[in-house]
Image (tube, helix red, strand yellow):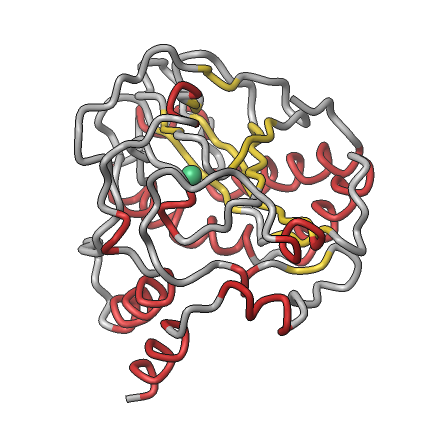
Amino acid sequence: MLSASQGALKLCQLAKEMVEEAFHPLDPLRIHESLPAEKSAEILSTLKPKFIHHPKAKEYLAEMLRESGCDLDKTYFDVPRMRTAFPGDYLKSGIAYAFHPHRDTWYSAPFCQINWWMPIFELNSENCMAIHPQYFEKPVKNGSSLYNYHKWNLESRRSAAQHVKTDTRVQPRPEEPVELEPQVRLICEVGSAYLFSAAQLHSTVPNTSKVIRYSIDFRTVHLDDVQGRIGAPNIDSACTGTTMGDYLRGTDLAHLPSEVMALYLDGTEIQYAQAAGS
Ligand SMILES: [Fe+2]
């Protein structure tokens, strides 16, 4: 767990203000009490991308990394996402997807990736996120062999173009019962962050509280790890493709050098780029 820093507090404050503005004059923690789920989904589908692409979000994130001791010349991050977890069955799919237990490495993330997770409003143990550390060394039968990140992006663009509301894209899931206990529920103050390996099994805790959870997460890789192919062991991921093209250097938002990125390419990026053009 990482204590609050100025950059982190600014990032959380930016997100908080955007949430409050989007749902004004309602209490953003309790919009499920008065707003139809379709309306909330509509507001979130504007709010979430707006946060992701906000220029200040990247600036504050880089500041947070520097204050955390990261070498910005060698630390690359992807854009910060805003997530929500609604109480009960109010809104669980699409724009407010409640994540089943998964490893990010089932979704083409590299094994050196570190996930950063932070709350935007005060958290409690009934609306947070959990990791399931016993599975770090224990394989889980899963559907990652059908997942390719480049194919996923292609399908996303196609479904967006067709204005498809329901998400029919197949996500990698456990294909055997998963023992969710023992679990570590991630709770920290606003401005603090949890860091964990992309290879850790983690999930959205079913929200049994009265209030909505809003959180930020993003991912980093370190150039030396990427170059050295250093990272967690692969015990059960069979996906193809890579998210390496998403990371931006802390200093100037440059992508990873192409010769370094090439270590992770398997040809599927060309296959789906050609499909996109056809
Ligand atoms: Fe994840």
What residue is rendered at 74% in x and 55% in y? 250
- Eyeballing the image, is 22 above or below 33? below
Q: Within the displayed image, which quadrant is ligand 1 positioned in?
A: top left
Q: Position of residue 278 (x, y in %)?
A: 28, 89
What residue is rendered at 31% in x and 24% in y? 33
Determine which quarter of the picture holds residue 61.
top right
| 272, 34: nearer the viewer | 272
Using residue 263 as the reference point, say whether residue 202 is left or right of it: left
Determine which quarter of the picture holds residue 142.
top left
| 103, 94: nearer the viewer | 103
Q: Position of residue 23 (x, y in %)?
A: 45, 39
- Eyeballing the image, is 46 above or below 259? above
Q: Position of residue 6 (x, y in %)?
A: 80, 33
Using residue 2 as the reference point, say whether residue 133 is left or right of it: left
| 192, 227: nearer the viewer | 227
Q: Position of residue 185 (x, y in %)?
A: 46, 16
Using residue 173 as the reference point, say whether residue 70 is left or right of it: right
What residue is rendered at 45% in x and 60% in y? 242
- Eyeballing the image, is 25 above or below 61? above
| Tally of marks | 0
